[in-house]
Image (cartoon, rainbow, N blue to C red):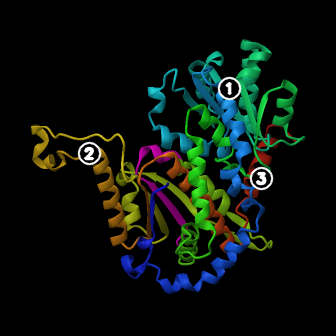
């Protein structure tokens, strides 16, 4: 059972003083929030066919797990070919559960993973050497099958696979994950070459797809307990059946940001006190920016809404961003996340030559030091009147991570409904893609 503390008190006047919200303000928008809740659950994305239904979609889970089992023992490297929503969710979960130094400890029983979400030629060449075709599985992911960067990588790596291992080797080493639609170029390629192909459901957008085969399959290849991940997400789903913000943390989180936006707080800072959670911050930046940065509302009126997301990692960014957060303008809402415990932890014995000044650290663990610095940062922010929400999972395990992923996806969708915008499209991104494609001679 997930055990996570979500504490909103650092956003309210009781702790912040005059800069904080008062309960009367929350009460004033409760009817609007209830209407947003009801509208959201009428959206197809919140049905069993959308992202909300993924935790209980046994067919998608089984297809991913069964294929991962078939491939087990045949590879030392997993190379994910994808960008944006086709990669960020996977990286967030893999880093959180396997650790930021996982690849350095990998062996035959612990395959390494690499994500090709860049176009740097020298780095791509490195993958040729680091992950040779006869020791690797390649997973190409694009919902539309029209992602230019992924198509370029796929052209390069599929050609090399066929050249070095033949057509049969290509079929054994390359898996496609895409929407099963006739006009989809990746789907057509999979059919023509008889490649194994997993489905991205039509109603699940890239940034909401981490709990579909997009994330589940490559995570299963690495031995992650994906059933626990989905169980955590489903346990969170039970929390959002009510429109009472005191019982529905995703709605409460959205309401706080909605109210602060009207006070001029247009920046969201995700401050993650654990290096292995850096990927979660990257995923949150995409989820928040693409879902909430919109020129028009659902009625077609020009609104130009959005919150600028910033991801920070503690304690490193105590030594860069924290000065601005504490003494800078009142234009941010900060979410701090840190684990309640670390297993295994590392205890410290301070030698005699450092005891003067640092003797108090003797007997403390690094986990204790990290938690003290996180709590110190939280309290300093609150004392400075800066709206700060803290989220503390008891431990970083698959259930808790699944719970957090679903919490943030639902909170994002709620805030979009409060604003009357569509959380599930990204027309601005498409414009950029169209222009770059034309510059390269495409239609």
Q: Residues within 10 Å of mark 2 (few under 14, many from 20)?
A: some
Q: CA distance from mark 1 to mark 2?
A: 42 Å
Pick whichever of labels 2 and 3 is earlier in the sequence. Answer: 2
Q: Which mark is residue 431?
A: 3
- Residue 160 painted magenta: no
For residue 391, side relative to residue 232 (left or right): left
- Element under label 1? helix
For residue 89, side relative to residue 147 (left or right): left
Residue sitting farthest toward the right: 182
Determine whether 236 is above or below 435 in the image: below
Pick whichever of labels 1 and 3 is earlier in the sequence. Answer: 1
- The percent position of residue 415, horizontal first and vertical second, equals 63, 69
- The percent position of residue 273, horizontal first and vertical second, equals 40, 52
Provide the residue designation for mark 2.
Answer: 365
- Residue 419 in view: no
Query: Tag count in the figure?
Result: 3
User: Could you tell me which quadrant the C terminus lies in?
Assistant: top right
- The percent position of residue 223, horizontal first and vertical second, equals 56, 33
Q: CA distance from mark 2 to mark 3?
A: 50 Å
- The percent position of residue 170, horizontal first and vertical second, equals 75, 20
């Amino acid at each position: 059972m997930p055990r996570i503390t979500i504490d909103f008190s650092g956003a309210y006047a009781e702790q912040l003083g005059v800069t904080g919200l008062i309960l009367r303000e929350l009460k004033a928008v409760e009817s609007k929030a209830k209407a947003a809740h009801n509208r959201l659950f009428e959206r197809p994305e919140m049905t069993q066919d959308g992202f909300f239904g993924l935790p209980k979609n046994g067919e998608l889970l089984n297809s991913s797990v069964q294929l991962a089992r078939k491939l087990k023992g045949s590879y030392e490297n997993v190379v994910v070919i994808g960008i944006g929503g086709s990669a960020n969710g996977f990286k967030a979960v893999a880093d959180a559960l396997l650790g930021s130094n996982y690849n350095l400890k990998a062996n035959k029983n612990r395959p390494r993973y690499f994500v090709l979400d860049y176009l740097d030629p020298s780095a791509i060449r490195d993958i040729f050497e680091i992950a040779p075709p006869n020791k690797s599985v390649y997973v190409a992911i694009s919902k539309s099958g029209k992602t230019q960067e992924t198509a370029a990588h796929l052209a390069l790596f599929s050609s090399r696979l066929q050249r070095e291992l033949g057509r049969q080797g290509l079929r054994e080493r390359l898996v496609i994950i895409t929407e099963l639609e006739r006009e989809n170029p990746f789907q057509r390629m999979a059919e023509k070459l008889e490649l194994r192909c997993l489905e991205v459901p039509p109603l699940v957008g890239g940034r909401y797809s981490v709990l579909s085969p997009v994330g589940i399959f490559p995570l299963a290849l690495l031995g992650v307990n994906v059933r626990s991940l989905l169980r955590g997400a489903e346990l969170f789903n039970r929390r959002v059946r009510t429109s009472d913000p005191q019982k529905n943390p995703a709605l409460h989180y959205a309401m706080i940001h909605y109210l602060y936006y009207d006070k001029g707080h247009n920046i969201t800072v995700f401050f993650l006190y654990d290096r292995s959670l850096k990927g979660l911050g990257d995923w949150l930046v995409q989820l928040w920016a693409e879902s909430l940065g919109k020129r028009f509302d659902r009625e077609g009126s020009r609104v130009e809404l959005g919150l600028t997301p910033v991801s920070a990692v503690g304690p490193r960014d105590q030594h860069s961003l924290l000065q601005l957060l504490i003494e800078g303008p009142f234009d941010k809402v900060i979410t701090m996340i840190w684990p309640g415990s670390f297993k295994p932890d590392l205890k410290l014995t301070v030698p005699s030559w450092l005891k003067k000044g640092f003797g108090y650290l003797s007997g403390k663990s690094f986990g204790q030091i990290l938690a003290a610095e996180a709590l110190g940062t939280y309290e300093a922010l609150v004392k400075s009147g800066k709206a700060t929400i803290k989220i503390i999972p008891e431990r970083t395990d698959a259930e808790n991570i699944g719970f957090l992923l679903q919490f943030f996806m639902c909170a994002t969708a709620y805030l979009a409904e409060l604003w009357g915008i569509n959380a599930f499209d990204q027309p601005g991104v498409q414009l950029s893609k169209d222009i770059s494609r034309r510059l390269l001679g495409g239609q």
